[in-house]
Amino acid sequence: MSDHQRMSYGSKGYSRTDGYLDGKNHRLEGDIHGKIAGYYRLSMEDDDSKEESNSITNQRRLIKRYLLDHPELSRYEYCEFYDDGFSGTTMNRPGMQAMLEKIRKNEIQCVIVKDLSRFSRDYIELGDYMEQIFPFMGVRFISITEHYDSQEQMGKTADMEIGFQSLLADFYCKDVSEKVKSSITAKKNQGKYATGNTPFGYRKDENDREKLLIVSEEAEVIRHIFELSLAGQNLTQICRTLNDEKTPTPLEYKNQRKKQNRKELQQEHKYWQPGTVRTILTNESYLGSMVFHKAVQAQVGGNWTLLIPREEWKVLENHHPPIISKEVFDKVQEKFFYKKEAVRKPVLYALKGKSYCGYCGRRLKIMKLTDGTLYYYCTYQKLSSHNRCLAGSVSNELLEKIVLGELQKQITKLADMEGVRKEAAERQRVTIRKIAKEATTLEIEIRELMKRKAGLLEAYHTAVYTREQYMESRRHLDRQISEKRNLQKKLKEQWDSYKDLLFVESGNDEDLRQYAGFGDLTKEMADAFIEKIIIGNGKTIDIYWKFNQNHTFDL
């Protein structure tokens, strides 16, 4: 195996630390403490004719039966991972990622699936795992339907039939994706509403799922938003009005209609946002038009989409009942599409990105007054009259002065502690050198044991030892290796502890000293020493330093 291959596995987070020989010595062979993982997947691409055979329950039953029929596997601990409703074209599935994380931690020694398409429908990705990653990790891979067992393929690549089947699975998935997309596009061109989600203010007709009906209560909110816009309110002012009136957000309305309990709805504060209002004010759906072909997939079966220019969007007018008249809609659009874009220069200041609101925890914005002074504020403060977020009462000049003063105090303390720190630092360095020497000796001993273990396996294969002698000697060596690894781990913890202490005592000193004569706070200084600053509405400022000495101030 080349160095390039080893690096590529490392980039995916896989590493091997137990001395396997070229990936051929499967861990399951002699380690009764290993785990077997069964993986099941059911996606929307599985049609009705296959629903029974591909169901999670039937995949589980088939794998359990396989384990019972193979006694050498049934004695191992069994764990399950599954994904329901996820496509096989991507490995970014919750169950799959949880299983791969266990494999990275060397907790799983064998993976069993019903067929290759359950694991992946991406031919290239599947090949990577079957031919390279699993053998490298010493993980046994079994696909029941294809009668594939990697233990029987040692030293060989997967046969042509397996490769051809995985390639067909890849083509099948992309073909289905393309056909589904074409079918949806054809329905839309015929005037049928073939989209899963409906715009706020509409719902699907229960008797005809391809038609839209108006939701009266939501439609009133939409008309109210347009009225506020015509009255001269900007996006933030409209949000403030709606939040003060305690108008439910679109997500809350959707929850009321569909009796959902989504995670987003469990948040304590739910506010109308400027982005949500803008989307409503520019949505041509409220004219009764169906707008589609706004984006296309970058590649078949992929997750990336390419945005299409607005003038190329497809619009079917009089598709469903309108909520807003064209006259009102056109007047509102003038605010968004017919005004000249203002050129804004970025505001530069030392504590940019470091300050947070003490009430909602969000990052603070900076407000520049006409006289050039800067004040911090929280964007959420303007969204409701009852909000307790920061309302622009702390000036940047004052905050920078406080931070600079504290930095200078830290620099002054260095002069008094210089001698003591040098003495302590030298003692720490002696201890670190001693620990490093012990760790080096341990590493040499472990390598020698690993060589003996490798020689033991070779002796077993040449019939020098019986299997019982081999297993007993291997267990003895494994115990020694494990004991030395544990001791090595403790030494590493000690080494890290002394290193961290050495850094705290002296590592920051040099950085601090170079700013001893500075009269102003710079961005470089803020990035070097400040983790974050939390500003509360009660005129309190909490400074979190990177050298673990946090302070609270009252203005």
Image (cartoon, rainbow, N blue to C red):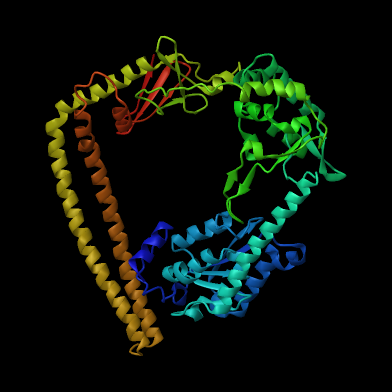
Q: Is residue 307 left or right of residue 11?
A: right
One can see residue 234 in this view: yes
Give the x, y percent position of residue 509: 20, 33
Along the line of sight, the residue nearer the viewer: 331 or 484: 331
Image-based side of 123 in relation to 326, left or right: left
Residue 238 position, x and y percent, is 65, 19
Q: Nearer the viewer, residue 178 or 5?
A: 178
Tag count: 0
Residue drawn at (74%, 25%) of the image: 222
Residue 375, above or below 129 = above
Expressed as whole percent of the image width and height from the top left, the position of residue 13 reads: 42, 57
Residue sitting at the far right: 207
Q: Is residue 490 left or right of residue 363?
A: left
Residue 225 visible in the snapshot: no
Quadrant position of residue 313: top right
Give me the residue at 49% from left, 67% from top: 129
Q: Residue furthest front?
A: 311
* Residue 418, position as x, y percentages in the image: 14, 31
Q: Is residue 344 left or right of residue 456?
A: right
Q: Quadrant of the N terminus?
A: bottom left
Q: Quadrant of the C terminus?
A: top left
- Residue 399 falls in image quadrant: top left
Furthest toward the top, the residue is: 371
